[in-house]
Image (cartoon, rainbow, N blue to C red):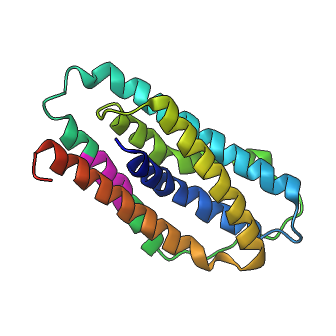
Amino acid sequence: MTFWALLLIALGVSADAFAVALTKGVHMRRFNLRHALIIALTFGVFQAVMPLIGWMLGSQFARYITDFDHWIAFGLLLLVGLKMLWEASSTHEDTEKDFDRLRVRELLVLALATSIDALAVGITLAFVPVSITGAVVLIGITTLVLAFLGVVIGRRVGARLGKPAEIVGGIVLIAIGTRILLDHLAIW
């Protein structure tokens, strides 16, 4: 897998974290650099660890399913992408209160919830030729940067970018899954 494909995957799985970080920024009464860094680091670490766990799980089964691993990779990325598109299209009211205090338990739950998709992507990475170390580092750093930017932008602009980011992320993951399938079927 090329660096650019990995970067697109990193951007795709980071979209949820970016959207949540935007809302965290929107609800800050005043910008707090320390809180923004903690939010970004938490999301970055979770998004890096989950694909590693997924890759380790997927690697255990890779030798048994090499004949159809490309279908599994395609299916997982398609499901994650469709889930992101579904969530972006859902309408829910923002009921979160503005805050000055960082709620660690809530942050950990949000980081875990937004990184479940990265676990599925990690399973997919077990079926393609990739340096898992490089992939994990790239996903973690990309998420850290996007989450930090999400907090900053959210504080300044508002939450208008959250849904479009999730839509783009979903489309990118579906496109990469399709590309993996077409490569293995020798169509591309």
Q: Is residue 75 above or below residue 15?
A: above
Q: Position of residue 131 (x, y in %)?
A: 43, 31
* 39 to the left or right of 31: left
**Residue extent of the magenta highlight:** 74-82
Percent of width and height locating residue 48: 57, 38
Residue at position x 65%, y 76% in the image = 159
**Residue 109 in view of the camera:** no
Asked where in the image residue 62 lies, by quadrant, the reply is top left
Q: How many marks?
A: 0
Vertical order, 169 against 53 (above or below)? below
- In the rendered view of the protein, which quadrant contains the N terminus? top left
Task: Inspect this view and state whether residue 134 appears.
Answer: yes
Residue 145 vs residue 87: left or right?
right
**Which residue occupies the foreground of this view, 179 or 75?**
179
Residue at 48%, 38% in the rendered image: 135
Residue 56 part of the magenta-drawn span: no
Q: Main secondary structure of the magenta part?
A: helix
Q: Measured from the top left, where is residue 80 in percent x and y?
A: 38, 53
Q: Residue at x 20, y 21 (%)?
A: 64
